[in-house]
Amino acid sequence: MPVALRIAGYLRKYPSFAVGTLAAALLSTVLGLVYPRLTGYLIDDVIAKGLGDRLPWLIGLLALVFLGRDGLNSLRILLNNLFEQRVILDLRRDLYAAFQKLPVSWYDHRSSGDLLTRVSEDVTNMERMLIDGIEQGLVAFLQIVGVGVILFRLDPLLAAWSLAPIPFLAAGALWYTITAHPRYRIQRKAASALNSLLMDHLQGIRQIKTYGWLREGAGRFDHAAQDVRRASLKIMKAWAFYNPTMAFVAAAGSCLVLWFGGRAVLEGRMAIGELVAFLLYVGMFYEPVTRLHSLNQLIQAGRAAGERVFAILDAEPEPGHFPAQTLGHLPPRQGSAREVRFESIHFSYRSGREVLHGINLCVPRGTSLALVGPTGAGKTTLASLVARFHDPTSGEVLLDGLSLRKIPLEEVRREVGVVTQEPFLFQASVRENLELGRPGASDSEVERALQAACAWDFVRALPEGWNSRVGERGVRLSAGERQRLSIARALLKDPPVLILDEATASVDTATEKQIQLALEHLLAGRTSLIIAHRLSTVRKATSIAVMDQGKIAELGSHDSLLRSGGLYAKLWSIQSEHGEIQTIEGLFSAN
């Protein structure tokens, strides 16, 4: 659907603003049309005849006309800005809602900088098109129609000559519309690439400095900035030719009026005041025509931006967001955990390569299942199906016997907690980050979670305690501190199903012991899936699934798998020889 029709759908939500803007524009245009007529009367019937006593009244009337016109214009501008700002707010809200409903796999193929550009710069370009384009376009249309009617009533032949340039102006506008739109698309794409590169470099500034990559980074940024410059210059070059050319063609209308109207005055067929009024009306006719050419530039930029914005709104959301796509709800919990079952799971990413092949597993309530195996075996992919970040290509994931496909996504996500290897903290306070797990948590609940996560001591020592801000992505905290806050957040959420994805892989041994102690509290009484490379962290799991090339190669307890002498026993032996086995007693004892 064209961008204009999509925008019209948003405009229809606010009919009172639309009617108010139209009424103010119509009345101000009507008052503006009085000025040339009064000017002609002033010259021919007041000044030429020496009726000086009428002059003050006529000037006063003109002042009232200008006051009314400009007052209505002020009202129109105010109403239009209120109108369009509501539309832009709706657009931004819909964009954010769309981001929340899009599947995780969608983000795997987009850059954050590009998405940020669409929400900020592209919506701003649409805003300019809406505020200036619709408002000025409406006024221009009313003024052109009103003045055109008056011109033909005053002198049809002279009006026809004055409008002779119109076909050339229309042809120029069509040419610019057709040729400029691709240029604006390229420019928006280049600006998006520049913002994506800048975001990457800002987030990786420590790596850039550490590896001495300053010159290379600057070179890449300069290359992207040059792409934006070149794309923008192509737009400006076309505009530099188009705008003055159209202004010259429009001026030809006034020249034709002066030629034919001047001859009519010399021959006594037209009074001087009538010619002056006619010239003023011609100026009023071509002024909005010229303005429309300028608006065409905004419209093309807005169209290109709108296509990028609506591409997000039209993207297919992940299933399960709408009641019509679900058939049931989870039964009440039996205790503090739920059963997780995988039945004949096959899964392929968009590339088409199948990464999971017929997985069948059951994790009873309150037990733990460890997923181990070489990198690329499918461990994280399998666990992500439980949080429904993806849906299996075939087969079912069941929670307490009910397929996840039949449960609303919001309900699924309430039941599942995830602690990842690289915990994400927002640029907010410690407490605000924790309340992501339970909005509105009480002070005592927050404190208990921090204590259970072995984080209370370091949080209390921060300058403002749990009101201290952690910096972007938690940069003001150590890796171990960030991980313990992530565990505290999961404790606050209190989910019946927990996924630990390499939760201790990126910390040192001393920090790992603190995190393992926090995990002991977190895992107690819950159904848990633990992904790990270090086998020391899973030896006390209820059962261990060894994955290899998307299949379950072995399944059993730590002791039984060692006795079988298979892949797990080999991995254990390798890690033991390299001193990587560190026994952390009691980690899974509660399960």
Image: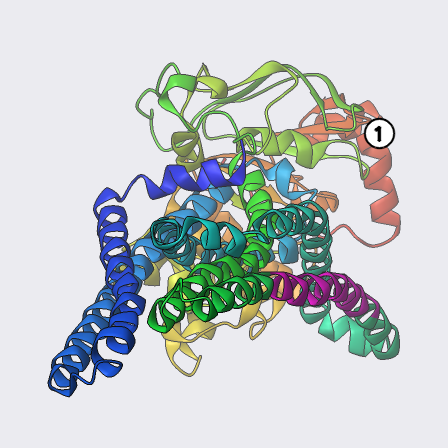
Whether residue 122 can be seen here? yes
Please state if 490 lies on the left or on the right of 228 as rendered: left
Q: Nearer the viewer, residue 173 or 578?
A: 173
Whether residue 485 can be seen here? no
For label 1, count other residues whose C-alpha is less than 10 Å away and answer few (under 14), some (14-19) or many (20+): some
Which contiguous range is marked in magenta?
223-249
Confirm whether the magenta stretch covers residue 242: yes
Q: Nearer the viewer, residue 480 or 543?
A: 480
Please state the horizontal and vertical placement of residue 272, each as a whole percent of the image.
38, 73
Q: Residue furthest front?
A: 267
Residue drawn at x 78%, y 23% is 352
Q: Nearer the viewer, residue 352 or 43?
A: 43
Residue drawn at x 72%, y 73% is 205
Please state the horizontal and vertical placement of residue 587, each as a whole percent of the image.
56, 46
**Residue identifier under label 1:** 567
Q: Quadrant of residue 15?
A: top left
Please state the horizontal and vertical placement of residue 114, each as a whole percent of the image.
64, 54
Number of dots carrying numbers = 1
Q: Quadrant of residue 70?
A: bottom left
Please state the horizontal and vertical placement of residue 544, each as a whole percent of the image.
67, 30
Please state if 189 lies on the left or on the right of 415 as rendered: right
Confirm whether the magenta stretch covers residue 91: no
Q: Main secondary structure of the magenta part?
A: helix
User: Which secondary structure, mark 1?
Assistant: helix
Residue drawn at x 64%, y 48% is 177
Q: Amino acid at mark 1?
A: Leu
